[in-house]
Amino acid sequence: AQKVTQAQTEISVVEKEDVTLDCVYETRDTTYYLFWYKQPPSGELVFLIRRNSFDEQNEISGRYSWNFQKSTSSFNFTITASQVVDSAVYFCALSVTGGTYKYIFGTGTRLKVLA
Amino acid sequence: DVKVTQSSRYLVKRTGEKVFLECVQDMDHENMFWYRQDPGLGLRLIYFSYDVKMKEKGDIPEGYSVSREKKERFSLILESASTNQTSMYLCASSPSTRGKNIQYFGAGTRLSVL
């Protein structure tokens, strides 16, 4: 069975602090994809990144970076120098190539960035 | 840009009413999905459709049905709304490629059943 765990329910930081959101996944499949989405107060989930199971390179996009480690089944997301606009709920999701098209979502982490 | 549009942002209905939630996408995607989002539970899949008139149950289909008569439109139907169906409903679409497909989401419909 597949599972995604986001153990941090809510995190509060002060603007300009760095923050890491944790994501731990479980799957027996060797080929799979991991995703991060952002859900601002407006409600729409916004796609941030997709990573496949064969690519363990870390990725950086501006203030965002992602650390994928198969050895610990983790796909963590770091925001550097956080800003108030980063306040949102962040979801990690897993998709496997066999079977259906479905995502398995974590329960989300609410990030509050205080001015 | 992919656009997924849900017809209502907020809905208030009474117990026992038949409720229709509509979703339209403009990117010719084969797949469409309905999720509900509840605090502490994340997103749970209700139904998805991989082609016109084709559908499959997700994790929590009880009390819901769906309709996909046209490729761009996917409707979620609550046959007889109940208070435990008060939730945020999110629609998504994706191209057909398995596994690696990115799902694009609408803004959600917050439904209250009184």
Image: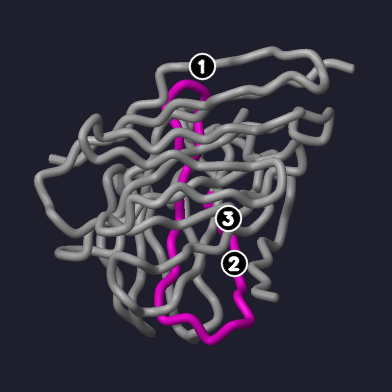
Mark 2 or mark 1, which is nearer to you?
A: 1
Bounds of the magenta segment: B18-43
Query: Mark 2 touching mark 1, by CB under 8 A?
Result: no
Give SS at disc 2.
strand
Q: Which mark is residue B30?
A: none
Say whether residue A60 is left or right of residue A74.
right
Q: Chain of mark 3?
A: A
Nearer the observer, A101 or B102: B102
Which residue does the image show at 39% across and 45% down from the upper left? Answer: A93
Nearer the observer, B31 or A1: A1
Residue under label 3: A47
Residue at mark 2 shares a chain with residue at mark 3: no
Give SS at disc 3.
strand
Label 2, label 3: how far apart the Cα atoms are? 19 Å
Mark 2 or mark 3, which is nearer to you?
A: 3
Query: Whole-percent x and y of residue A11?
Result: 62, 15
A6 vs B27: above or below? above
Label 2, label 1: how far apart the Cα atoms are? 29 Å
Say whether residue B38 is left or right of residue B52.
right
B71 vs B44: above or below? below
Q: Which mark is residue A9?
A: 1
Sequence-earlier tag: 3 or 1: 1
The amino acid type, in three-letter code, at marker 2 is Cys
